[in-house]
């Protein structure tokens, strides 16, 4: 099974490069909108601030789920045996799931090649880096191992899936820690921006009143 991220899930279904690019941009733009003249600045700042809290909760939830999954794999032989049976069935060379897996892996490799050769604006270098990280997280055997050959024994499989689960816990913790480092600064940034906008709006209102006199 291939472990997709929230940003690579549609790649295997034929998502185009432009759509993948725009989807990854949303990770940097909490409010993905057209900045027209009547752009609701205050509303967007408030929504962006709220989305910070929402994202933090999502990352905490994902980390807790990874920990719970690891605990379940360690404590439940029934669960591991169920997964092991599905694994053995999927390893058949003529298995439709095996063929689909190969096609999905190729989809991610093709998209990764497209991203790497795309010359993005220097200002969006972090977006390109993020796109590459998401794809490599999905396909790289170090982070998301593909089912190896020959077919593993039950004990080998159990060790394998637990190692995968341990890596997932580690990755989700790293993502959470990285976000938490900038969380307070980001909140302060939006609060300061909101206060500044309010001050500017008051000043603008005052100027307009004086002009009417």
Image (cartoon, rainbow, N blue to C red):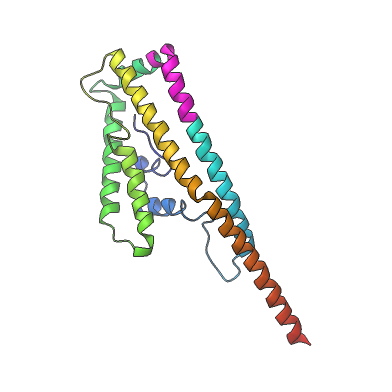
Name, please, the residue furthest toward the right: 213
Q: Which residue corresponds to the image point at 40% horizontal and 15% vertical from the top-left? A: 82
Q: Is residue 200 left or right of residue 130?
A: right
Of 149 and 62, nearer the camera is 62
* Magenta stretch prevailing secondary structure: helix
Q: Which residue corresponds to the image point at 63% horizontal and 67% vertical from the top-left? A: 196
> Magenta includes 156?
no
Of 106 and 193, nearer the camera is 193
> Is residue 29 shown above or below 150?
below
From the top left corner, tell me how far across and down residue 146 is, in percent.
28, 30
Magenta stretch? 65-81
Q: Is residue 186 left or right of residue 194?
A: left
Quadrant in which the N terminus appears: top left
From the top left corner, tell me how far across and down residue 147 is, in percent.
27, 26
**Residue 16 in sight here:** no
Name, please, the residue furthest toward the left: 150
Q: Which residue corresponds to the image point at 43% horizontal and 24% vertical from the top-left? A: 70
**Residue 96 in sight here:** yes
Q: Quadrant of residue 197?
A: bottom right
User: How many tags in the picture?
Assistant: 0
Q: Which residue corresponds to the image point at 38% horizontal and 18% vertical from the top-left? A: 83
From the top left corner, tell me how far across and down residue 110 is, in percent.
26, 46
> Is residue 208 shown above or below 13?
below
């Amino acid at each position: 099974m291939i472990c997709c991220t929230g940003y690579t899930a549609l790649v295997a279904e034929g998502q185009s490069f432009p759509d993948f690019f725009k989807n990854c941009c949303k990770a940097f733009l909490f409010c993905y909108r057209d900045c027209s003249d009547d752009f609701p600045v205050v509303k967007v700042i408030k929504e962006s601030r709220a989305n910070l809290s929402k994202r933090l909760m999502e990352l905490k939830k994902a980390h807790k789920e990874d920990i719970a999954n690891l605990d379940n794999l360690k404590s439940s032989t029934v669960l591991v045996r169920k997964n092991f049976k599905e694994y053995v069935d999927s390893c058949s060379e003529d298995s439709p799931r095996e063929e689909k897996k190969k096609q999905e892996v190729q989809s991610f490799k093709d998209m990764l090649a497209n991203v790497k050769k795309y010359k993005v604006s220097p200002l969006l270098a972090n977006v390109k880096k993020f796109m590459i990280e998401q794809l490599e997280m999905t396909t790289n055997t170090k982070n998301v191992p593909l089912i190896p050959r020959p077919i593993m024994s039950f004990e080998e499989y159990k060790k394998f899936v637990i190692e995968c689960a341990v890596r997932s816990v580690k990755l989700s913790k790293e993502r959470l820690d990285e976000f938490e480092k900038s969380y307070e600064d980001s909140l302060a940034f939006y609060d300061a921006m909101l206060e500044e906008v309010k001050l500017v709006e008051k000043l603008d209102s005052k100027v307009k009143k004086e002009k009417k006199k």
